[in-house]
Amino acid sequence: LQSVDLSNLDSVREFCQAVDKEYDIIDVLVNNAGKNSAGTSTQKLKNGENLDDLFTTNFLGHFLLTNLLLQKCKRIVNLSSVMHHFPVYSRKDNISDIDS
């Protein structure tokens, strides 16, 4: 069992290196993790640029993971969530603003 933090691109790379060493073939890669908009923050990269954690977790992490494991994968399944249907007010700290 390996864990990976999709919001940390170095963690994704380390995970892929470990999987690459241990497995010859990946029957199915399922990209299913996601993060909603509550409590977003940014992270500073080695090159000094800032990335939004939400964007990194939901998009860049999955893209990098899939790209690095692509040659070993027989099938890739990308799932999405319904979080885009919920308004910004789905955050607990803004719940009192709904009626105003």
Image: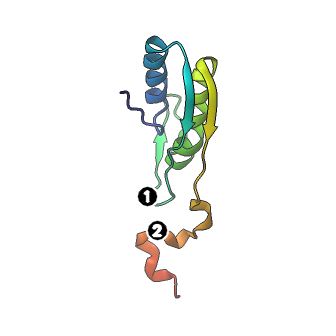
Left-right relation of 12 to 71: left
Residue 97: x %, y % from top left? 49, 81
Q: Which residue is farthest left?
A: 1
The quadrant holding residue 51 is: top right
Q: Residue at x 52, y 49 (%)?
A: 54
Q: Residue at x 49, y 23 (%)?
A: 13
Mark 2 vs mark 1: which is more N-terminal? 1
Q: Residue at x 52, y 87 (%)?
A: 99
Q: Circle 1 sits on which residue? A: 39
Residue 59: x %, y % from top left? 60, 42
The answer to whether residue 86 is above or below residue 79 is: below
The answer to whether residue 57 is above or below residue 1 is: below
Q: Residue at x 62, y 66 (%)?
A: 85
Q: Circle 2 sits on which residue? A: 91
Quadrant showing the N terminus: top left
Q: Tag 1, which secondary structure?
A: loop
Q: Cβ–Cβ below 8 Å for labels 2 and 1?
A: yes
* Closer to us: 30 or 47: 30
Give the Cα distance between marks 2 and 1. Answer: 8 Å
Q: Tag 2, which secondary structure?
A: loop
* Closer to us: 70 or 39: 70
Residue 61: x %, y % from top left? 54, 36
* Closer to us: 38 or 22: 22
- Amino acid type of the residue that numbered disc 1 sits on in the rendered structure: Gly
* Crowd tier of the residue under label 1, counting other residues whose Cα lies within 10 Å: few below 14, some 14–19, many 20 or above: few
- Amino acid type of the residue that numbered disc 2 sits on in the rendered structure: Arg
The answer to whether residue 58 is above or below residue 83 is: above
Identify the disc placed on residue 65: none
